[in-house]
Amino acid sequence: MPFVTEADVQRMRAQLFFEGPEVKRKLSRYWLLLLLSAVIAAAGVVGDSTATVIGAMIVAPLMVPILGTVLGVVLADRQNLLRCVGLVVAGAAAVVAIAWLLGALVGVPVVASNNSQVAQRVTPRLIDLLAALATGAVGSVALARDDISDTLPGVAIAISLVPPLAVVGLTLESGATDQARGALLLFVTNVSAILATGLVVMAIYRVGHRVTVDPDGTGKPVHRGRATAVIVAALLVITVPLALTSVVVNQTTSTESTVTRVADAWAAQQNWDVASVTTRPDGVLIRATGPLPEPDADSLRAALAAAGVDASTSVKVELVPNHTVEVTPH
């Protein structure tokens, strides 16, 4: 595998660090694109529009200071490391604030129960971490090798950064703090994955061997080992809630699948149809329609017990009779 050259390192510094004579221009571009992407993401979530949310992902510049943090650690550049971390934190806070304000203007709760964009981002699982690790690796390789840099737009779409923050702001404004925590966990998961895989890729390409740490002697260099340990520890800590969420989601999916199968068989025997089976915080809700008289729910209860559905699981049936009434005037 070819190692990076000094020219490659200088190219990466120019792409990721906010320094030099162009620093004001870089900062203004960062904030302009970030604020606009925040508005686009929040509007896309409120409108439940996947296309709009994807547009926000492409515009969002948060990937730059995150990868800049990686490069700062690898090069032991304390000044640029702190600057990039500050931009990530400040940028994340700004996106949450903008989404909160937009949610206040909309005046309608934007939560998982009525919005698919929110529902997709409030229950992160271990599979999300795996996807983030792979996507972060692609982004880091694309940074180290300018011959595959065309993949970066795809990386921006694959690893969601601004949309989860928009969901945090919107759900906070709606009073759904649990969902806000879930969306924030997704954002932190993605950031941690980028940092961890970025360090691995930079080590493979031996980026740290191409520069002299603090050549001017004007600042205290970063302790690479400690910084790496912090990133790895954060990644390990994040796996705990992700694993717990994965277990809960798997159990919920299994229960819902069993209830659906049993309910379909029960409804067919009663000449009714199951319209939907939905898992809610208070249990599983079955919506069924059919002709009068209403079917016997006791037989469904017995069938669920026989299928192994836990007695602690609350299952309710919403029966919607489907019959015709003659209203023709005489």
Image (tube, helix red, strand yellow):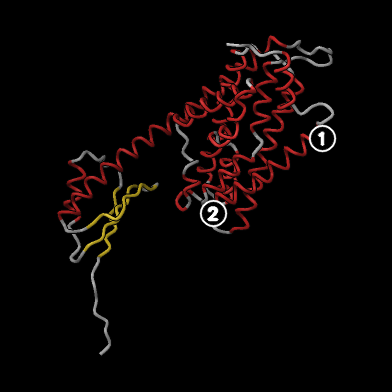
Residue drawn at 58 percent across, 17 percent down = 201
Residue drawn 73% across the image and 22% down it: 13
Question: What label sits on residue 47 in the rendered view?
Answer: 2
From this view, report whether residue 265 is shown above or below residue 24. below
Which of the 4 image quarters holds residue 292?
Answer: bottom left
Q: Earlier in the sequence, mark 1 or mark 2?
A: 1
In the image shown, does 135 or 166 lie closer to the viewer? 135
Label 2 secondary element:
loop
**Is label 1 in a helix, a strand or a loop?**
helix
Q: Is residue 178 left or right of residue 37?
A: left
Which amino acid type is marked by label 2? Answer: Gly
The answer to whether the residues at label 1 and label 2 have Cβ atoms under 8 Å apart is no
Splitting the image into 4 quarters, where does residue 19 fall? top right
Q: Is residue 249 left or right of residue 170?
A: left
Examine the image and state in which quarter residue 149 appears: top right
* For residue 324, above or below residue 175: below
Quarter of the picture containing the N terminus is: top right
Q: Residue furthest bottom?
A: 330
Which residue is nearer to you in this view: 147 or 66? 147
Residue 101: % across, % down: 65, 52
- The residue at the point 55 percent across, 52 percent down is 46
Residue 48 x/y as whole percent: 51, 51
Q: How far separated are the C-alphas under marks 1 and 2?
A: 34 Å
Question: What label sits on residue 151 in the rendered view?
Answer: none
Q: Is residue 233 left or right of residue 90?
A: left
Q: How many numbered badges does the structure rendering display?
A: 2
- Mark 1: amino acid: Lys
Q: Can you identify the residue that label 1 sits on?
A: 24
